[in-house]
Amino acid sequence: MERYRSAAALIKARRPDKPVLALRPHAAGRAARWFAQNFDGDIAYAYKANSSVFLIGALYGAGIRHFDVASLPEIEDAATIPDAKLHFMHPVKARSAIRRAYELGVRSFSLDSEDELQKILEETAGPNGPSQDLQLFMRLAVPAINSLIPLENKFGISGEPATELLVKARQVAAKLGITFHVGSQTTTPDAYVMALKAVRDLIFHAGVVIDHVDVGGGFPSRYANSEPAPMEDFMKAIETGIETLPVRENVRLMCEPGRSLVSEAESVIVRVDARRGRHLYINDGGYGVLFDAAHLGFVFPSRLVSRELPEDAPMQAFELWGPTCDSIDHMPGPFLLPDCIQEGDYIEIGNVGAYGRALAGHFNGYGTYEEVILLDEPQMTMYPVEAEEASAESAKQA
Ligand SMILES: Cc1ncc(COP(=O)(O)O)c(C=O)c1O
């Protein structure tokens, strides 16, 4: 794949006709190393967030070996990663998917109902009876606090039924865990505090031994309209919450970050095909990488990359329109860009690495991208620049 110093360098070299997915694998590697240094447990990357081999390679290089997978196609893919430990964390699975996952070596499954427990037991049983090596995670419903995409309306169990299910799962699981998901892009740590309180109450009521606690995903990224608490605060809240749990010393922790590992590792570079006042018509949109900007109000950081302007060039708040023929394909933003922007200019829209590529479809003939690697830094980051990078940068400047 071609490599460029920056999106501006790419546009200086050539003016691509298709939108460009610009990868920064080093940003994914940095995020994974930050988690490895600050989270005392297994880090299971949520594969659905972005399955580009370049990013998976960077995560792998940073030590990631656990993967949260939610579908059979993901499992078939991720099972080819050497030493990968897969966790099938979708609480509702097809019987055929459970069977095939087990054949492929998956032993870790989540569930939030007795029906699902039964399904897992039936589909993983062998000629000599029930499987003896299941690692079962019961998914607890927890409140979403300051999250942009709540997940608990759909999955999770709570109250007395949760206690009963946990006791039943204990009787058949080689290893038993509790899992939850506080909702994606959770910007303050209190959701984890509340969730771990619910885990504590559940363990007290059920009175069973717990081998694993999985705090799920939900860790935030930075966007132009979302400034989360520092990532350290999330880790501190989790550490404090775990200390209060009635579990043994050797309880194993896990987390399932998706967004926070890959969001910064991809930008999309788009061309302005028309300007109408404060409205820019661009060549990617809500049916493409910018789904979250069209449908969930995300305002990704953006910058003009086809011209150099003085720092004090006047700025303007723009709305963006995608290339399809309907008005759903609209990213209201506002996206702050130079007021002089015009047809033929290129914009880098950053931090789209989580779910952007994964959600892009082919409606209206769109949805094919060029891909390049960029060597510079993302527009916004949650992570401190690492010592090695900092010394390379100062050597460059000396
Ligand atoms: C079970 C599970 N784990 C982890 C994730 C990743 O969440 P996030 O990208 O918010 O970290 C998801 C996202 O949908 C999920 O459903």
Image (cartoon, rainbow, N blue to C red):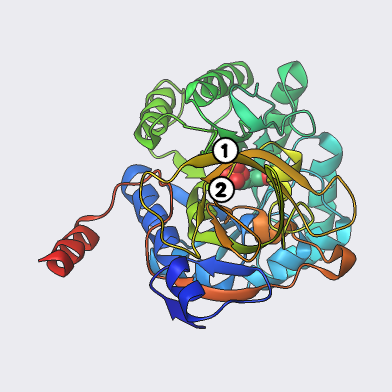
Q: Amino acid at mark 2?
A: Arg
Mark toward the start of the polypeptide (2 vs 1): 1
Drawn side of residue 6 relative to residue 119, left or right: left
Find numbered disc 2 in the image and state the secondary structure of the residue it sits on: helix
Going 24% across and 62% down the picture, which residue do you hit? 389
Going 43% across and 55% down the picture, which residue do you hit? 378
Label 1 near label 2: C-beta < 8 Å? yes
> What percent of the width, then of the height, locates residue 142?
65, 24
Under 8 Å from ligand 1: the CB of mark 1?
Answer: yes
Q: Nearer the viewer, residue 283 or 156?
A: 283
Q: Quadrant of residue 198?
A: top right
> What percent of the width, then of the height, locates residue 233?
37, 29
The furthest residue to the left: 398
Spatial CA distance of label 2 from label 1 is 7 Å
Drawn side of residue 115 relative to residue 369, left or right: right
Relative to 149, does residue 83 appear above or below in the rendering? below
Labelled disc at residue 381: none
Quadrant where ligand 1 appears: top right
User: Is the residue marked by circle 2 packed among few (<14), some (14-19), or many (20+) residues within 10 Å?
Assistant: many
The answer, for residue 82, to whether it is visible in the render is no
> What percent of the width, then of the height, locates residue 375?
38, 69
| Figure label count | 2
Task: Read off the residue under disc 2.
Answer: 259
Relative to 65, does residue 31 appear above or below in the rendering? above
> What percent of the width, then of the height, locates residue 81?
56, 74
Task: Read off the residue under disc 1.
Answer: 218
